[in-house]
């Protein structure tokens, strides 16, 4: 703990916390991050880099950290790779591991890549591994995968819970530094809903790193505590550990709140993370600025870090990042870092500034602290194996780089100036404007109701941030009708400053050998960027992709502007002419859990179940998903596989009676004086003259003439139809009908009501169906005369008001009993009990599919594919010939749809009795050269039915004229010959539909 | 996610309550059988791909259930106005002015 | 002919979850009728014995206006409503949907916040004594706000377990937050 400075920082020294790093126990304090705790024991080495396996330590102190990525483990399944050590707070028992090293962090064989770095230069993916072609899969890709990379994916299921919530507010302020705090003060107490968020564990932003500032007479930390208390009292919602990850249309902000990763014990029912979707009337972006590294050879060695971050580690965590640091800077701010570290006992070896002149007060203070100063110098190298041990600096005179001089040190604190954090602003499609003085882009216009305040728009210093936060918030408040003056602030001990921005620093070495890193996480150097330009990349977007600069998980937070400066120099253009690459959400890496929220396990997606579903489950049903529904597919008895069970169910239904849950069928009640007219216009069949108490099969087409859906439509009353649709088509059909009704025929007096879930529908099919049902329907005689096929009635069934249909989707005598949904299971059990005397068989969707195929009844979406007309399907009989118009009528007359040679639905019987595969392609001549001309494909194929051999349905060109012909189905190892037959395999005379005939 | 003003509910609500329903002001001919193949093709398939103001239809599916029309600027992805089905096309020049 | 298909009423309310934050209860079925009509509604007002609410969201005597020509009527005497409306010559549609939906009552100091788990619209902006269709976790629901801290959600039967699951886990999450 020798690097911990007493009396500094905000960590709670009364609460030591033990955790492990690569199996070694480390002790830090409550309030520490993994990075600050490791630095407190003098340990900078925390990982290995992506491509070259170079030793790396933290370069920053916040979420922009590119290097110090670790694996964290809190318990079984609670492993997370690539966590930034600078953001992970300590908690008891936390296990952390370094990444991308083998066998150990300190000795890593992969570091051979560092020597072979020529292989990995810009565009290496495209060049080195192009030839020979088949080497890619076998040699190069495995090599790259093994050699490059960051953390490993977790393998266990995550036991944590994740949450999401929507929020609406008047003002959302992103960033709780001085600008954000001033904005919140400005907005508070006006009866507005104000939300202030910050990604760190505590609010304060830069104030946490600058305790010396005195705000309106109060020391910064006292002012901060008082302000937070005031804001809370005024009802401002302050959310820490909450990252605004993306700014979406019309002021919708995505935010991830981390709720438990810092807790020793996770309370019950508490999610690990919560995704907030915040709709704000006004947004204040006060995200501050990010410090830029200087680009020089060896700027990635552990111990080389940003000066501002060193200041943060000292003032916020009480940790000295080095006892003999040297400062290398082009900006005033790093001088203050030097002064702060010196004040904490560090022996600052030198302040080296690239500028020839700096402010007198800085020089005077350095002198007072006995810190040597070197102006007009460049840095050309660092040395040290796992930790920096010296910095080589050279005097620059004009374009000449003088002799190098080694400065011994244990840390290099660098600053290349500051970049406004523009990420969220850019998500808004906000325009950026180049500022030549600051050598950076500043926010300009945005289409969103959004202002940007403080360092985020290039203002430097606590007072400037506070004043701008108040002023910008007031501008946003004006839009909400609030007129008041912006609050004023006065700050002493403030540290405003300026600086210059560089491309890579000048050097006396061969630039081709320099490893001057621009993007630490993706191991991109200045040389790579220049190579990309030399090799023809002109657009910054191309340079980015060729080099992968800015494409790592830190999204180029540190590298974008440095990369741009170098690329622009190489291109010989000004930066604004080169432009910036696009910032995309999320701002920081976000867990899949946060995106999934509640949608996992049984709640992954909606699973709809019928009222009878529980009975099916109790009786061993195997399910299949149909749309959002789960439906019983078959009911295996002990030892049965699907084929055996379905074969049994088919036979039992044709032999006696089967019971089937048809509740998922879509049902629409069409009511009004124009009900018949509407149904007649929608369906191909004629409906105007359908009698009350009758039903009719209906085909629904689109106006293009192709089949969309089908179902049976019953006329309950003159002005009332009960329309059924396919299970999967229910919502789509209702939407289509509403569309025509509302927008094409608003004059019709008719209304549509979904009654899919009003009714449970139980289908009884088989020769004994009427016999089974009759005792429960005392008011209606179920005979061919009194209730023929395609009848419907409102009657009591088993004492319950019901809609009873005489319909069949099996070719057997069939009934569908509709009862109010909650009574469905009761009726099912009643019929099940009564059916025992007939060996009643519960069957599922698979048997339903087989039995209907034996009758040539189509399933829309299986035997049709959106390009099949009623005539193609052999269902011209369903098209009303005398109708003036219906949806699809004109479409069916289109030239292509009446042309000969269209694919038509037919039956197929294989010559060798084998079963065809659904989807298999069909050819006429199996001996023709490849590619063969395909004339169609198999749509349905079954061998569990009652025909005694496998059957199939197929769409074949001109199929209805090919009856009796042999076609061929080429399969991987053989070609199957099949005869074209009628699609009706069972009872073409429909005699089995008649009560009394089949039994 | 967009905010959409439903002209029936008279509320501005999140896009999640709505579904898109294609280009607006395409009228199904009163007598389709009198249409030539070219006319029917035009009705079925030919759609605009406007850069700028686009007349389109939405449905307040998880709400009042109504189809309605909208003018949306496809460049800014902002709604310029919404109005009930059957109402005439709003004047584009005044809408674009209102935006500026 | 307007077939009345209602079924025995009077099950006990069933509490799904009860926490300090919010209590979620599945309430007994009531007869529920979907009424559609347009034009001069006076004849329907007379037949029903009260004026149908005219604006979307409005609620009068258990009847909510859900669309420009759509009302949902909650009643204890569906037969009487059907009989009365049968005499009305104004074209209309009356459909019994009593069996279609399940109702959850959501009551407690954080009832409004519980709904924010699934509703993208601003719950706080919904006035008391109103109802409308909206979306909750991808499912269409009818949301009634009875008081500041009491809501009802009507949801089709097959979606109810999905909605109930989120309401229950959300109620526990909110309670844990208060602890």
Image (spheres, helix red, strand yellow):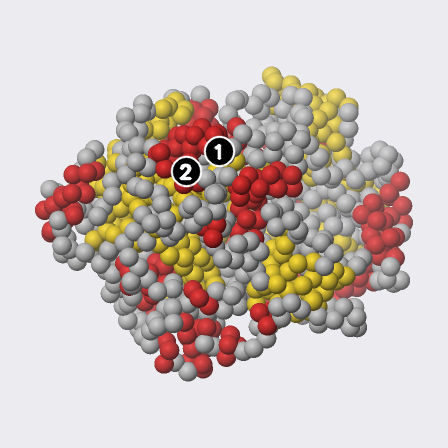
Which residue is found at the position 74% from the left and 39% from the top? A152
Under circle 1, the secondary element is helix
Q: Circle 2 sits on which residue?
A: A771
- Please tell me whether residue A299 is drawn above or below residue A616 in the rendered image: below
Under circle 2, the secondary element is helix
Question: Crowdedness of circle 1 by 10 Å Cα count: few (<14), some, many (20+)?
Answer: some
The chain that hosts pointer 1 is: A
Residue that sits furthest to the top in the current view? A14
Residue A686, image x, y percentages: 35, 65
The chain that hosts pointer 2 is: A
- Please tell me whether residue A447 is drawn above or below residue A763 in the rendered image: below
Check if mark 1's residue and mark 2's residue have beta carbons within 8 Å.
yes
Q: Is residue A778 left or right of residue A79?
A: left
- Please tell me whether residue A647 is drawn above or below residue B90 in the rendered image: above
Q: Which disc is residue A469 wearing? A: none
Q: Is residue C89 visible?
A: yes
Q: Circle 1 sits on which residue?
A: A838
Q: Is residue A119 left or right of residue C54?
A: right
């Amino acid at each position: 703990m020798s690097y911990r400075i007493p009396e500094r920082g905000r960590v709670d020294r009364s609460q030591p916390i033990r955790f492990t790093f690569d199996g070694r126990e480390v002790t830090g304090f409550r309030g520490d991050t993994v990075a600050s705790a490791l630095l407190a024991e003098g340990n900078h080495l925390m990982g290995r880099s992506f491509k070259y396996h170079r030793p790396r330590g933290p370069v920053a102190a916040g979420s922009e950290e590119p290097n110090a990525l670790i694996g964290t483990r809190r318990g079984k399944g609670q492993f997370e790779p690539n966590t930034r050590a600078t953001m992970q707070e300590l908690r008891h028992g936390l296990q952390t591991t370094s990444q991308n090293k083998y066998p150990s962090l300190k000795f890593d064989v992969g570091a051979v890549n560092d020597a072979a770095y020529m292989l990995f230069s810009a565009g290496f993916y495209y060049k080195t591994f192009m030839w020979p072609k088949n080497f890619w899969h076998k040699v190069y890709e495995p090599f790259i995968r093994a050699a490059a990379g960051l953390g490993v994916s977790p393998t266990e299921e995550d036991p944590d819970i994740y949450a999401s919530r929507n929020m609406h507010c008047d003002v959302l302020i992103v960033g709780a530094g001085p600008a954000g705090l001033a904005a919140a003060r400005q907005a508070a107490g006006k009866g507005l809903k104000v939300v202030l968020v910050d990604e760190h564990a505590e609010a304060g932003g830069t104030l946490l790193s600058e305790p010396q500032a005195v705000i309106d007479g109060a020391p910064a930390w006292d002012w901060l505590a008082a302000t937070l208390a005031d804001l809370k009292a005024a009802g401002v919602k302050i959310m820490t550990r909450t990252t605004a990850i993306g700014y979406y249309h019309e002021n919708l902000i995505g935010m991830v709140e981390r709720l438990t990763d810092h807790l020793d014990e996770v309370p019950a029912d508490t999610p690990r993370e919560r995704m907030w979707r915040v709709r704000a009337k006004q947004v204040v972006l006060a995200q501050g600025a990010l410090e830029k590294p200087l680009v020089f050879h060896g700027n990635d060695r552990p111990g080389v870090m940003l000066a501002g971050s060193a200041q943060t580690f000292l003032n916020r965590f009480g940790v000295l990042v080095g006892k003999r640091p040297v400062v290398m800077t082009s900006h005033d701010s790093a001088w203050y870092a030097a002064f702060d570290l010196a004040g904490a006992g560090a022996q600052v070896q030198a302040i080296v500034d690239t500028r020839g002149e700096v402010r007198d007060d800085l020089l005077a203070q350095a002198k007072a602290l006995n810190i040597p100063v070197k102006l007009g110098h460049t840095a050309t190298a660092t040395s040290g194996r796992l930790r920096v041990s010296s910095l080589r600096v050279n005097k620059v005179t004009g374009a000449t780089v003088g002799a190098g001089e080694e400065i011994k040190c244990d840390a290099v604190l660098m600053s290349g100036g500051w970049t406004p954090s523009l990420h969220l602003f850019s998500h808004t499609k906000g325009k950026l404007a180049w500022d030549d003085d600051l050598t950076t882009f500043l926010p300009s216009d945005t289409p969103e109701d959004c202002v940007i305040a403080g360092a985020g728009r290039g203002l430097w210093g606590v007072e400037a941030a506070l004043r701008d936060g108040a002023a910008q918030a007031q501008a946003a408040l004006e839009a909400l009708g609030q007129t008041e003056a912006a609050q004023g602030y006065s700050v002493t001990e403030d540290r405003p400053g300026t600086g210059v921005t560089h491309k890579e620093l000048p050097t006396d070495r061969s630039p081709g050998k320099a490893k001057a890193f621009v993007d630490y996480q993706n191991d991109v150097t200045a040389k790579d960027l220049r190579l990309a330009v030399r090799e023809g990349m002109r657009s910054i977007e191309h340079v980015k992709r060729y080099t992968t600069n800015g494409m790592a998980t830190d999204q180029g937070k540190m590298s974008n502007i440095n990369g741009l400066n170098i690329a622009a120099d190489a291109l010989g253009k000004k930066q604004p002419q080169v432009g910036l690459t696009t910032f995309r959400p999320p701002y920081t890496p976000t867990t899949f859990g946060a995106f999934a929220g509640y949608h996992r396990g049984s709640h992954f997606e909606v699973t709809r179940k019928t009222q009878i579903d529980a009975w099916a489950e109790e009786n061993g049903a195997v399910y299949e998903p149909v749309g959002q529904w789960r439906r019983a597919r078959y009911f295996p008895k002990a030892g049965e596989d699907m084929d055996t069970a379905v074969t049994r169910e088919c036979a039992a239904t044709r032999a006696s009676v089967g019971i089937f849950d048809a509740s998922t069928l879509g049902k629409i009640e069409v009511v009004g004086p124009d009900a018949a007219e509407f149904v007649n216009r929608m369906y191909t069949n004629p409906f105007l003259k359908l009698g009350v108490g009758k039903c009719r099969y209906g085909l629904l087409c689109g106006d293009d003439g192709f089949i969309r859906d089908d179902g049976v439509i019953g006329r309950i009353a003159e002005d009332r139809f009960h329309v059924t649709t396919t299970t999967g088509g229910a919502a789509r059909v209702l939407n289509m009908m509403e569309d025509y009704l509302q927008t094409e025929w608003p004059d019709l007096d008719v209304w549509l009501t979904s009654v899919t879930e009003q009714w449970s529908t139980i289908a009884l099919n088989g020769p004994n169906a009427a016999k089974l049902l009759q005792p429960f329907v005392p008011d209606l005689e179920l005979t061919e005369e009194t209730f023929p096929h395609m009848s419907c009635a409102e009657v009591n069934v088993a004492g319950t008001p019901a809609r009873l249909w005489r319909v069949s989707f099996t070719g057997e005598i069939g009934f569908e009993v509709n009862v109010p949904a909650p009574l469905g299971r009761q009726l099912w059990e009643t019929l099940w009990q009564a059916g025992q005397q007939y060996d009643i068989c519960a069957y599922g969707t698979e048997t339903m599919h087989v039995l209907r195929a034996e009758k040539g009844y189509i399933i829309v979406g299986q035997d049709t594919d959106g390009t099949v007309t009623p005539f193609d399907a052999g269902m011209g009989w369903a098209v009303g010939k005398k109708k003036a118009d219906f949806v699809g009528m004109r479409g069916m007359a289109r030239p292509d749809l009446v042309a000969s040679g269209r694919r038509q639905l037919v039956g197929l019987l294989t010559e060798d009795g084998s079963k065809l595969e659904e989807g298999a392609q069909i050819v006429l001549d199996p001996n023709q050269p490849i590619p063969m001309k395909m004339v169609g494909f198999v749509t349905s194929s079954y061998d569990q039915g009652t025909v005694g051999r496998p059957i199939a349905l197929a769409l074949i060109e001109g199929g209805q004229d090919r009856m009796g012909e042999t076609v061929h189905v080429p399969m991987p190892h053989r070609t199957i010959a099949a005869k074209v037959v009628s699609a009706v395999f069972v009872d073409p005379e429909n005699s089995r539909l008649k009560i009394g005939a089949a039994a | 996610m967009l905010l959409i003003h439903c002209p029936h509910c008279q509320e501005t609500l999140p896009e999640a309550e709505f579904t898109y329903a294609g280009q607006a002001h395409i009228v199904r001919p009163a007598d389709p059988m009198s249409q030539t193949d070219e006319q029917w093709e035009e009705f079925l398939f030919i759609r605009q791909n406007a850069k700028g103001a686009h007349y389109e239809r939405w449905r307040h599916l998880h709400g009042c259930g109504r189809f309605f029309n909208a003018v949306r600027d496809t460049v800014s992805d902002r709604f310029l106005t919404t109005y009930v089905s059957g109402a005439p096309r709003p004047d584009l020049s005044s809408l674009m002015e209102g935006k500026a | 002919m307007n077939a009345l298909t209602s079924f025995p009423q009077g099950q006990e309310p069933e509490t799904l979850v009860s926490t300090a934050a919010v209590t979620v209860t599945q309430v007994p079925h009531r007869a529920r009728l979907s009424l559609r009509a347009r034009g001069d509604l006076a004849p329907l007002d007379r037949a029903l014995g009260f004026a149908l609410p005219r604006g979307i969201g409005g609620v009068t005597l258990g009847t909510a206006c859900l669309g420009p020509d759509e009302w949902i009527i909650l009643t204890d005497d569906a037969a009487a409503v059907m009989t009365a409306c049968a005499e009305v010559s104004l074209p209309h549609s009356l459909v019994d949907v009593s069996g279609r939906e399940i109702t959850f009552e959501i009551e407690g100091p954080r009832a409004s916040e519980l709904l924010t788990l699934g509703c993208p619209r601003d719950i706080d902006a919904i006035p008391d004594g109103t109802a409308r269709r909206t979306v909750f976790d991808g499912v269409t629901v009818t949301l009634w706000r009875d008081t500041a801290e009491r809501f009802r959600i009507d949801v089709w039967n097959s979606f109810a377990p999905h909605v109930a699951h989120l309401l229950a886990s959300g109620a526990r999450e909110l309670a844990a937050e208060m602890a």
